[in-house]
Image: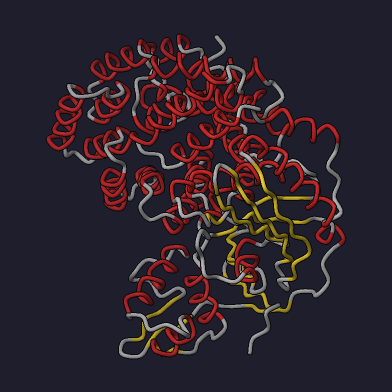
Amino acid sequence: MPSDLKIYEFEGFRVEVDKRLLLHNGVSVPLTPKVFDTLLHLVQRPGYVVDKEELMRAIWPDTVVEENNLNQNISTLRRVLGQNQAEKRYIVTVPGKGYQFVGNIVSRDQSLRASTSEKSRATIAVLPFENLSADQEKEYLADGLTEETIVSLGQIDPNHLSVIGRTSVMVYKRTTKTLAEIGRELNASHVVESSLRAEGGRLRITSKLIRALDQVQIWSSSYDSEPVSMLAFQRELGSAIAEQIRLQLSPERMTALARRQTKNAEAYDLYLRGRYFWHQLTPPTTKRAIEHFTHATQLDPKYALAWSGIADTYASAPINGDAPSLDAWARAREGAARAIAAEPDLAEAQTSQGFVKFWFDWEWQAAEDAYRKAIVLDPNYPLSHRMLGIVLAHLGRHQEAKIEMRRAREIEPLLAVHQSLSAYLAFLEGDFDAAIQFARQAIVVAPDFWMGHFQLGQVYLQIGKAELALDSLNQSARLSGGNSKAFSLRGYLLAKLGRKDEALELISTLEALARERYVPPYAMALIYVGLEQLDLAFDWLDRAYEVRDVHMIFLPIDPKWDSLRADTRFIELLQRCAFTKS
């Protein structure tokens, strides 16, 4: 039996068996457990033709599955490894038999001794709280407590304790996997397992701290509570875990946690409901999230987290859902200002301020300052790292940007938007191979997430692979729910390919759509640039400036606008937007 301490390396890829990790040039490549099992079985037998039935028995030992499941795993691996269907670089199909791994593999044993720095650092995964109540409507409370516990534990001792982000742990909701499996997949040393039961207006919460390696329970406790005392529960939980792992929860951080939440039980409940709907990222649920956040601020006008929720919801709406920028700007700015006024030393409030400064005010240095302050306040808040990476990339500071985005991926390894935006940063730097790799990773993590396909199409367009670009953009448009970015980039590409009638048809489609809802003028301008109808392109860019279209921030750095950079109209536009110093 191959050792669990083996490492397999081939052409920049590295498979770490004990951590169940695939890395490419040092960057973690997220794989679902069964896809990883498929890869591992093949690389452990290089040159050997593995029978399909043998492979399926190894991957699904206790389950009868169809062969299509295996075919999908193989297809995913080829995509992740950058192998085209016709290539025979890594995984070769042997007709009538099975699959063969033909890559040049170097294998070696890992050292059994962890370094002192590795031993002194713990990583915790807070599993989704299990709702044991008969009332399924309490799901929002279970999810909210999961998220708030993650934040609280993340502030214990950021130098020695990492906490896996919300999105990465939520995939284990109602899982049948063992804690050892979860620990390996998330590279977590400890797991927090909790449940709640609501009865007669009170909550009973049970939490356990378990060492992932051997599943030994090292601490447990139960709490009978009313919603108003949830903060006390989280503080007690954090202190207990710090004691068990021998970490220090400083008085300053305890004070910050005490100020974090409202003392109004109903407002807290509304905030948790708002977060629950916000994470679903659809127009109807976004509207409900705003309603709950707003109601929470009415009950507690100094509730900084609720104001921050309002700001973030409005700030992201124009880029994610084509909401009118001017309306969103005013509401996001008010939310961020109220959050800062209520609690300036809150990472979420500073991050909301960064959103406004970046997307709407176009003051990128101020945005950087806000995100850096947020990171000092809570080094485990992934959104501030992610957004700081984007700001730094727009400022041309690509190496710093990569560091911040890498940190965001470490906190939230299974969040597809982190892989997608890593592709965007690599695209801006001109590292197209890395951009393609990150975009493919995003698609592996979330095949139905439009942004991964969009970033892949954008890179293919830039390197001249027009048909692959068009395929990716068609996928993105189909999955995006009508987002203008996917449609406008398709139109731009069609124009560049000389398929002008199709590009003009897309313009007509957007014009018809604009009679029903807001369509960003930037989208029209981009297609007209592709058509080389520059007067019309500048007309639409002027309209975009007038309505403060958030997409204008791409003008200084997106290579699709390079053909206009010597045009005095373009230079003057950048100056009006304050994107240049002159």
Picture coordinates of residue 559 (x, y %)? 42, 33
Picture coordinates of residue 566 (x, y %)? 41, 18
Q: Between 467 and 423, which is closer to the camera in this rendering?
A: 423
Q: Can residue 177 be seen in this snapshot?
A: yes
Residue 572 placement, left or right of 239: left
The vertical placement of 58 against 320, above or below, is below
Q: Can residue 372 be seen in this snapshot?
A: no
Which residue is at 71% across, 36% downward? 378
Which residue is at 53% across, 32% downward? 271
Which residue is at 83% across, 61% downward? 119
Looking at the figure, which quarter contains the C terminus? top right
Which residue is at 42% across, 24% downward? 555
Picture coordinates of residue 148 (x, y %)? 62, 41
Picture coordinates of residue 331 (x, y %)? 46, 16
The part of the image, by quadrant, that contains residue 407 is: top right
The vertical placement of 523 against 426, above or below, is above
Residue 280 placement, left or right of 379: left
